[in-house]
Image: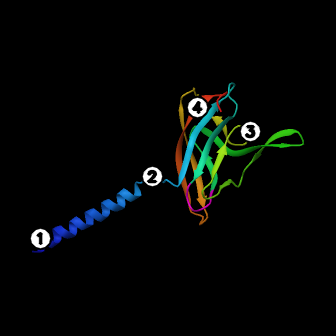
């Protein structure tokens, strides 16, 4: 009888721990990064990273920072026009993504400024970039996103 009870308890422990493991391994479907790409510029200067953030969750998010072993530094920038002049403004506080919204990082607008590549890149290469987000409860999370290197004329 005691062996039977121990077997049942062990089975229950295994089932519950398996359930917790499967839940923890589920992908986060509330935050999605679409079409991540890096435009390859000739001459070895800074590169730009573009993508779309989709926040399908119930809470606002903020993209705080980006980092990669492939670059010395990554900054979040926005192209702006003022009095006929174009310039870039660093978004040092990050950028907000409202609940249920999408935010486009595209040429002429928001982009990642990828400084001092540590490796030679070719069209078709994948470069891993970590994006760090915070939510309205100040919890942070990072997601590693593979960015594809594309030609300069690609959007």
Query: What residue is disc 3 on?
Result: 108
According to the picture, the residue beneath numbered tag 2 turns out to be: 27
Among numbered discs 2 and 1, the one appearing first in the sequence: 1
In the figure, 16 relative to 26: above or below? below
How many other residues sit within 10 Å of disc 3, few (<14), some (14-19) or many (≥20)? Answer: few
- Marks 4/3 in contact by CB < 8 Å: the verdict is no
What x and y, as percent, mark residue 34?
56, 43
102 over 71 or under it: above or below? below
Q: Residue at x 61, y 38 (%)?
A: 71
Q: Secondary structure at mark 2?
A: loop
Q: Secondary structure at mark 3?
A: loop
Q: Which residue is mark 4?
A: 149
Q: Nearer the viewer, mark 1 or mark 3?
A: 3
Tag 4–tag 1 contact (CB < 8 Å):
no
Q: Position of residue 108 (x, y in %)?
A: 74, 38
> Dot 1: within a 10 Å radius of its alpha carbon, few (fewer than 14), some, or many (20 or more) residues?
few
Q: Residue furthest right?
A: 83
Q: CA distance from mark 4 to mark 3?
A: 18 Å
Which region shows up in magenta? 56-61
Q: Are marks 2 and 3 in contact (CB under 8 Å)?
A: no
Q: Main secondary structure of the magenta part?
A: loop
Labelled disc at residue 3: 1
Q: Nearer the viewer, mark 2 or mark 1?
A: 2
């Amino acid at each position: 009888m005691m062996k039977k009870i121990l077997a049942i308890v062990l089975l229950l422990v295994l089932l519950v721990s398996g359930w917790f493991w499967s839940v923890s391994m589920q992908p986060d479907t509330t935050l999605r990064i679409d079409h991540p790409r890096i435009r390859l510029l000739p001459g070895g200067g800074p590169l730009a990273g573009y993508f779309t953030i989709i926040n399908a969750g119930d809470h606002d998010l903020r993209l705080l920072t980006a980092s990669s072993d492939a670059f010395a530094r990554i900054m979040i920038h926005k192209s702006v026009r003022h009095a006929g002049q174009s310039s870039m403004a660093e978004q040092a506080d990050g950028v907000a993504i409202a609940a249920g919204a999408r935010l486009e990082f595209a040429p002429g607008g928001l982009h990642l400024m990828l400084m001092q590549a540590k490796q030679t890149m070719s069209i078709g290469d994948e470069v891993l970039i970590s994006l760090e987000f915070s939510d309205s409860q100040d919890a942070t999370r990072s997601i590693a996103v593979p960015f594809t290197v594309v030609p300069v004329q690609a959007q």
